[in-house]
Image: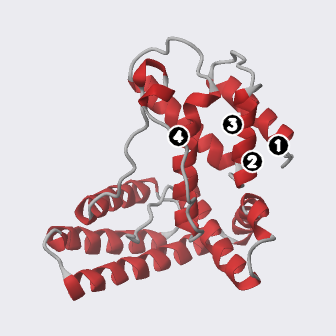
């Protein structure tokens, strides 16, 4: 998969065609400049695809699709997912954002708010996703037992989180980070070396545009976070840590 802007744009155009049920919407002119800008920022293709998916999911919730979607309408969602990806990996967030908004989308559709959820809401969402992952199963009794224990602990913490302040809140946040690391380590073990190696290759591709500008130790740290993120996606696990 090419990394040059022209190759990146072709991949985006092909993906947009699939999402538009085969209707080809060319990525040319201003749209080419927009998508080339994504490539210049180092947005991985799969991250861009996730942003496009997010726009289409919201579009379909409004009812039957009325006309093919242009890539320009997906810009705000792609940038939002890119920011989330960078934050998950510990990379600096972009210093500026495009001026998106309702007027950039058909029928005044603006992107959904990405403001941080409250801690109780985060814990509730994590417990629900852990319970869902536990129901899928198939990764061994030790992993299932860890999910059960984490879900019980988080469910108990959720009842008190709304009123937690100061050192108690900091202690809870540190516990969430520790649980997150424990879950990620067990998830890697459960997947096995071959699957983890595959995800390491994928993470390396995602970070290819950032590697040259990072110190070796920083790259290794970000690489580990990128692999953990892909492991969570593979197993449909939530991020327990709250930042």
Place of residue 63 in the rendered image (x, y in percent of width and height, measured from the top left): 40, 17
Residue 3: percent from left, percent from top = 84, 49
Residue annotated with mark 3 = 34
Q: Quadrant of residue 172?
A: bottom left
Q: Earlier in the sequence, mark 2 or mark 3?
A: 3
* Callout 3 touching callout 1 (CB < 8 Å): no
Query: Mark 4 highlights which residue?
Result: 76
| The furthest residue to the top | 66
Coloring scheme used? secondary structure
From the image, tell me which residue sits under label 1.
5
In contact (CB < 8 Å): disc 2 and disc 1: yes
Q: Which class describes the residues within 10 Å of circle 3: few (<14), some (14-19), or many (20+)?
A: some
Mark 3 vs mark 1, CA separation in Å: 10 Å
Q: How far from the left and from the top, in percent, is residue 217?
A: 71, 85
Residue nearer the viewer, 61 or 130: 61
Q: Is residue 213 above or below residue 27?
A: below
**In the structure shown, which secondary structural element does the residue marked by tag 3 occupy?**
helix
Q: Nearer the viewer, residue 31 or 190?
A: 31
Lateral position of residue 18 relative to residue 107, left or right: right
Q: Which residue is mark 2?
A: 39
Dot 1, how many residues are within 10 Å of its Cα: few (below 14), some (14-19), or many (20+)? some
- Secondary structure, mark 4, is helix
Name the residue rendered at 23%, 63% in the picture.
Answer: 120
């Amino acid at each position: 998969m090419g990394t040059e802007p022209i190759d990146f744009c072709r991949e985006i155009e092909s993906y947009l065609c699939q999402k538009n049920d085969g209707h080809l919407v060319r990525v040319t002119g201003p749209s080419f400049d927009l998508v080339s800008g994504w490539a210049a920022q180092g947005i991985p293709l799969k991250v861009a695809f996730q942003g496009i998916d997010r726009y289409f999911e919201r579009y379909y919730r409004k009812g039957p699709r009325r006309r093919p979607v242009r890539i320009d309408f997906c810009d705000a969602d792609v940038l939002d997912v890119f920011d989330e990806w960078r934050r998950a990996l510990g990379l600096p967030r972009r210093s500026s954002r495009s001026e998106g908004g309702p007027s950039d989308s058909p029928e005044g559709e603006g992107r959904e708010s990405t403001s941080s959820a409250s801690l109780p809401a985060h814990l509730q969402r994590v417990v629900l996703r852990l319970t869902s992952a536990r129901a899928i199963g198939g990764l061994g009794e030790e992993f299932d037992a860890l999910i059960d224990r984490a879900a019980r602990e988080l469910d108990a913490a959720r009842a008190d989180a709304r009123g937690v302040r100061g050192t108690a809140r900091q202690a809870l946040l540190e516990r969430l980070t520790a649980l997150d690391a424990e879950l990620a380590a067990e998830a890697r073990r459960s997947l096995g070396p071959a699957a983890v190696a595959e995800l390491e290759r994928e993470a390396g591709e995602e970070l290819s545009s950032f590697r040259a500008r990072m110190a070796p130790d920083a790259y290794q740290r970000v690489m580990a976070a990128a692999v953990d993120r892909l492991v969570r996606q593979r197993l449909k696990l939530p991020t327990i840590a709250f930042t």
